[in-house]
Image (spheres, rainbow, N blue to C red):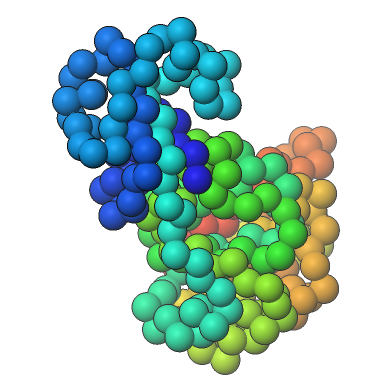
Amino acid sequence: MLLEGERLILDALGAGLEAELLLVREGHDELLERLDGPVTRAVAPALFERLGTLTTPPGVLGIFSRPASRDEGALEAELGQHGLVLGVAGVSDPGNLGALARCAEAAGATAMVLAPGGARPFTPKALRGSMGSLLRLPVYEVSDLGRAVAALSDAGFSQCVAATRGGAPLDGAVFSERAVVWMSGETGEAPPELSRCDAVTIPMAGEVESLNVTVAGALMLFAAARR
């Protein structure tokens, strides 16, 4: 996976991920010295500006081995390690996915369960949006959402799904010590596998119809963490 910028590079190294190649723009001597090693190369500015995905390239980019893959089998084996969990089903914008992971880590969640379809976690935009959270938070990319929901329920997790309207008000929602907060796609349509989860709606004033999925996710996650 491609990581761009000093913050993400250092987060990845701090998380124990292996760098295959680190490219540092010439002139960033302190950074070059800090990242000195067998896979680090200094790159001339004219060449460095042609690399990466950003309009304004940062001073460093790297190719890393992505974190070990976790599926529903791994989720079932490791359920005992988790309390508050973020579930994501069908979020299409990778920046939103990354920001949701960042909110989850900030709220104290210990894992993210990612349903099939939608944005994937280890793309450049998702990684930048997460500010490193996707490198620290265990991510379970499940292929069978129904199986994952059932396994979480069997392990004693309460599960709720954000609903634009028609759900129980968030300020009155009851969260257990082990809870999953599911966020569905930006259109607000949840997959049928989440139909048995408790629907929770964030009350809104005025004529606002909906909130950005990241804003809604932050409110839901911090409410669950408080209770």
Query: Where 159 sits versus 213, above or below?
Result: below
Residue 121 % position (x, y)? 57, 52
> Residue at 43% of width from left, 52% of height from top?
65
Rendering quarter of residue 170: bottom right
- Closer to us: 111 or 63: 63
Of all residues, the one furthest to the bottom in this rendering is 154
Residue 99 % position (x, y)? 54, 43
Query: Can residue 208 be seen from the camera position used here?
Result: yes
- Horizontally, is 75 left or right of 41 in the view? right
Quarter of the picture containing the C terminus is bottom left
Query: Where 16 sits versus 192, above or below?
Result: above
> Residue at 71% of width from left, 65% of height from top?
116
> Residue at 36% of width from left, 18% of height from top?
43
Q: How many numbered dots are placed on residues in this image?
A: 0
Residue 222 % position (x, y)? 47, 55
> Residue at 37% of width from left, 55% of height from top?
136
Rendering quarter of residue 22: top left
- Horizontally, is 25 left or right of 94 in the view? left
Query: Where 150 sits versus 169, above or below?
Result: below
Query: Can residue 175 be seen from the camera position used here?
Result: no
